[in-house]
Amino acid sequence: MAAATDTASNANAQQLVLEREPLVLNNRSFSWITNRICGIVENRQPLGWWFLFLPSVLLTGVMVFCFAYLIVTGVGVWGQKQPVDWAWDITNFVFWIGIGHAGTLISAILFLTRQKWRTSVNRAAEAMTIFAVMCAGLFPAFHVGRVWMVWFLAPIPNANAIWQNFKSPLLWDVFAVSTYFTVSLIFWFLGLVPDLATLRDRCKPGIRKALYGIFSLGWRGSNRHWSHYETAYMLLAALSTPLVLSVHSVVSFDFATSVVPGWHATIFPPYFVAGAIFGGFAMVLTLMIPVRKIYGLQDLITMKHIDNMAKIILLTGTIVGYAYCMEFFMAYYGANPFELQTFKLRALHGPSVWYYYAMFFCNVFAPQVFWFKRFRQSLLAVFIVSNFVNAGMWYERYVIIVTTLERHLTPGSWRTFDATWVDNWTFIGTFGFFMMLFLLFLRFLPVIAIGEVKGVKPEADPHYGESHDRGLQEAEVMGETDSEILASQKAAPAH
Amino acid sequence: MSNLKRVHGYLAEFDNAQDLYHAAEHIRDAGYQRWDCHTPFPVHGLDGAMGVSRSKLPWLVFFGGMTGTITAFVLQTITQTNFWRDNMGMGFLQKLVETYPTVVQSKPTGIWTLPAFFPVMFELTILFSAFTVLFGLLALIGLPRLNHPLFTSKKFAKFSDDGFLICIEARDPKFAQQGTRDLLEKVGAKNIELVEDDI
Amino acid sequence: MSHHHVSFKDLPEGGEKFDPAKASKVIGTFGALAAIGLLGSAYYAFGTHGDTQKGFAYSWLYAIFVGFTFVAGGTFWILLHNASNSGWGVAVRRLFENLGTMALPLGILALPLLIPGVQNTLWEWFGHHRAHPGLEGLHHAAESDPHLHPLVDKYGYLNITFWTIRFVLYFGILWFISTKLRSYFLKQEADGDIKHTVYAREFACMVLLPFALTVTFAAVDWIMALDYTWFSTMWGVYHFAGCAWSSMAAMLLLVIYLQSLGYLQKVVTGEHFHLMGKLLFAFTVFWAYIAFSQYFLIWYANIPEETRFYFIRNTGVWRNVSIFIVIGHFVVPFVFLLQQQLKKSPKFIGFWAAWVIFMHFVDIYWNVIPERAHSMGLEPAPGSDTPFLPGAWVGDVLALCAVVGTIGYLYLRSLGKHSLYAWRDPRLLESANVRN
């Protein structure tokens, strides 16, 4: 142990303290944090922003064109044919909804468990949630063909005197997704209010100041307000946590309540949720690694943050792997020949085994490199693995949905699915739409929760530096931080 | 616009959260009621130092959420079951919405199809609760309010950056032009300013 | 703020040693329970015959599985604590470590489950395997009895040799994990080196998956296989939720009791009760989510081979127990544990912890026992619609007393061997001063 300094605090025994790593590096001041984050909004955007924005707008146009083409032609422009009646539309829907879940996880579950490192990434992750849910919503909305009829999904009395079937998983989806979108929006907006006030106070009078002023609701940072505000924030976190579990559970019910082999598995709800968090974290990393670099946020989004997220990807990836194996085991153990046949077709001799292996590799094997700190600390490695996971989670949905339907219970109607150009370009177009929204968010709103990051600095504690604390620091803070321990461990000979 | 001005109160600045915290304890003990701290982030424990009681918002949200549960239960059972007619003797409710139960997967139309209604009951509970959080919060803190006397102070904008401010309002019964200023000075305030508002 | 900041000067060197003599009343009670339970069990196992004796096999399985959930739960919490690099739990972690090490005595108590007669009674597939040895034999038998077809398909997993290996592994893995994790901190108490904390974390991460598989397959082998045709992919997660829930409640009660004896006064505060109470609440909800999802998907899809499990438990007398579980296992604790401030009160949280343990007993009972009368081919008594083995509940209670009494007795005695908390853990002060 290289740098361990022992301190006698008791009479004989030596006692060390393992320090937590600081969440804001280089001891940046409160106003440095304000300036750096507000600067992103106030200054001209770097070239990289335009470099990404223009193609995104172009792709959004492609998406709009594809949807317009679908409306004027009919849903037949997609590749669905009997027996594959659900294909890319629902695959993409589940994929995008899943992406959103990490945002809620970071903002709600990590808040409830007092994981303070969340503050640097929660704002962007919440924005990502909202944009991802918007992308997701497009698919079910447009797959009805006559998109202006979508309001039939809402329980509003209509001229036909027919009510929605409230026992149908598809209707639960409507409730779950719209609730999820609304609550995420409220959560995001509430978190933004104090930061919008910061932007308002820095603006010159004009249209921008007026807009930031209106949306910050006249926030005055009053402690009597903070008191209610913190309660409200905690309540929303407590509501969002079961909500996020319910949303992907309800999505999984679309499949699991059926009697289709390969779909009907009781583990589907938590398995979908774990997968969603897994895929969502990958998307957060995919977005935040470039943002951190382009805007110079290394002191706020530190390697510790990246490291934590990589570990969560490893954990949830392993949970997903557990679920894959449990499905397989139960297909064997349940001794239902149809179930077993479905899994054999998926993994051994079906028409789409390639997808199954891609899924398994991307989701279960690729994240295993995060067992090693070297890979968690390499931005390039984290970025590459995250993208493997992004792809892998799409394959997972494709495997569950399409490969099952391709080999339905009636062999006479078996047919392999082929995506059309409209399928391809609509999906690619939603990425453009998603990126466009995210880039506009970077341009106009604070990408990091300014107030919250300030709140996790040690000097935000009203008892910081008080006498007993100071005594403690002098006597016992001679310990080491985590990374120092790990570094010295690497250096030390084998133990 | 007239030249008359109304005194809003004293606005005092502190160096950091620690000084603000101790000043708040003193002001609380001096018996002031209408005063407030303005900080860039919520300072832990400041509620206690100011003597602010816990928010009642959770209770509002509890009842908001219950409303959502009941709404979903009633909506679904009226339109999808014979519960209100057979068990509650209120068949007119089902007439009211002109409907008949949808029979799905040969499941009965009695109240024991309840599990199929849980997802929507759950979602509406959350939805109604979340709306109650938002609107309950705005009602409790009296926002949006786009104009406020404090915004006339140039110094006040620091609260959203790195300023730790205390404002004692003139409306407070203990407020005195000299006495209050002395108290603020005693507890270590910097840059004490008398905030005045146009009438 | 009256919050006093705890520093090393406030804590005794060498930690706090528990003196079993101080707790003689409770230890004595556990001992008495164990004695009564073991004697009664011995009577049922050897002194009775026929259905009563057979029925007692279920009682013993029930009691062993209850014990297993607590031990597995204790192991889970120390794994989570170490793997997540958490700090607040240092003050109470040793109690969970000791709970995990009870896997060894529990494994010894579970040995009767290896007796062929017991196995044939509990798990029909054992009987079929013994009557028709080998895959060939089963295959042959299945030609005349189609009910045996699933056993042919499952032969690779459900066979006596593999089952016995797994049986030993389940207890061995839990015992190994908890002893190993505790040993890191015992070493640390000797030399004060921080590296043990880091090693413990690395070890915990590596054994997370083996732990998950242990709980899953133990639940599959012992409970799900009571009916060899039934299956549910959620099964492992369901029982994992019960493990985490019940063990947290048990440890809450223990901490309250230790504090009442004058231990842990400095390192454990109301904040710890609050945090542990929150975890108890979280798992109340998580269990409900898992239990509902499993029930719901089977109920909704309505496939005959799956519905049998719920069909037995959702008709006749067991229906009342099912409804009681919905209310007592979820609704009531959910509503009360929702109260944020009350969770800091030892009396309040202690009451609900005791309730949780009771409901966990009921839940496992509901999982294991309904199968008994059906497997033994009993008919409902006149005027009843549910088959029951008359008077068997006495055996169930005695078996529970025997296992819980023995484990509780040994556990409390073992607490005195080491300090009650890891007194040289580098995060001890973080835990003692935790605020949330």
Image (cartoon, coloured by chain):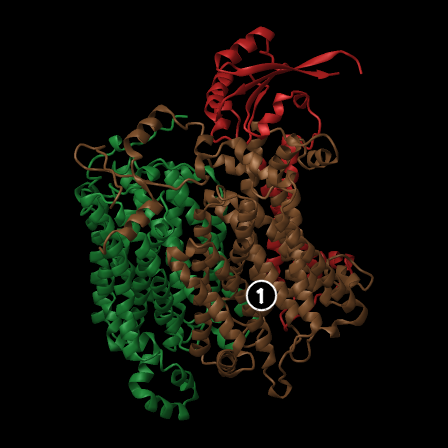
Chain colours: A brown, B red, C green
**Rendered-image quadrant of the N terminus of chain C:** top left
Q: Secondary structure at mark 1?
A: helix
What residue is at 45 percent from the left and 41 percent from the top? Answer: A23
Q: Which residue is mark 1?
A: A253
Disc 1 marks a residue whose amino acid type is Phe
Q: Report the chain holding disc 1.
A: A
Q: How many numbered marks are there?
A: 1
Judge by depth and name the residue closer to the eye, A444 or B96.
A444
Judge by depth and name the residue closer to the eye, A166 or C30.
A166
How far from the left and from the top, in percent, is residue C358? 37, 53
What residue is at 48 percent from the left and 34 percent from the top? Answer: A28
Quick check: A17 above or below A475?
Answer: below
**Rendered-image quadrant of the C terminus of chain C:** top left
Indicate the quadrant where residue A429 lies: bottom right
Left or right relative to C47: residue B85: right
Quick check: C309 above or below C200?
Answer: below
What residue is at 35 percent from the left and 36 percent from the top? Answer: C269
